[in-house]
Amino acid sequence: MGETKSHQFREDPGTVRFSSRSGILTAHTDHDGTITLDFPAAPLTETAAPDLLAESLGTSPEATYRTGT
């Protein structure tokens, strides 16, 4: 299989998939050179707000979430 060069994205739009530790990452390219990255969604878990967050924001958050473990 041939090597894909970055300038080929502008000449030959399409989709490229990369294997990563967090799963398949997809890059969609367009004729204007735009590259759109599609990252996998991480599941959210509601969690307690960190100390001083409300004070730092100047308001109390309705909810806070984290990703990962």
Image: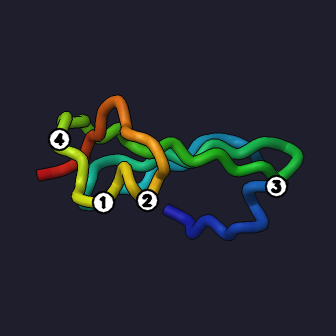
Name above or below for residue 6 compared with residue 54. below
**Horizontal relation, residue 58 to residue 30: left or right:** left
The residue identified by callout 1 is: 52
Tell me the residue at 30%/33% (across/down): 63
Check contact, mark 1 vs mark 2: CB within 8 A. yes
Q: Are marks 2 and 4 in contact (CB under 8 Å)?
A: no
Give the residue type that dot 4 points to: Thr
Of mark 1 and mark 4, the one earlier in the sequence is 4
Residue 6: image location, x then y, percent: 70, 67
Q: CA distance from mark 1 to mark 2?
A: 6 Å
Say the numbered circle drawn on residue 11: none
Label 3 to label 2: alpha-carbon separation: 44 Å
Which residue appears at 23% of the width and 59% of the height?
51
Q: Earlier in the sequence, mark 2 or mark 4?
A: 4
Look at the numbered discs 4 and 3 and tell me whether their residues touch, using CB distance below 8 Å: no
Q: Classify mark 3: helix, strand or loop.
A: helix
Residue type (three-letter) at the residue carrying disc 1: Leu
- Find residue 7 and report its image quarter: bottom right
Please give the residue where the numbered disc 4 appears in the rendered image. Answer: 47
Instruction: Please identify, in this view, whether the residue under mark 3 or under mark 1 is nearer the observer.
Output: 1
- Tell me the CA gap for discs 1 and 4: 15 Å
Q: Amino acid at mark 3?
A: Arg
Return the residue at label 3.
10
Residue 48 in the figure: left or right of residue 2: left
Residue ID for mark 2: 56
Q: Residues within 10 Å of mark 2 (few under 14, many from 20)?
A: few
Helix, strand or loop at mark 4: strand
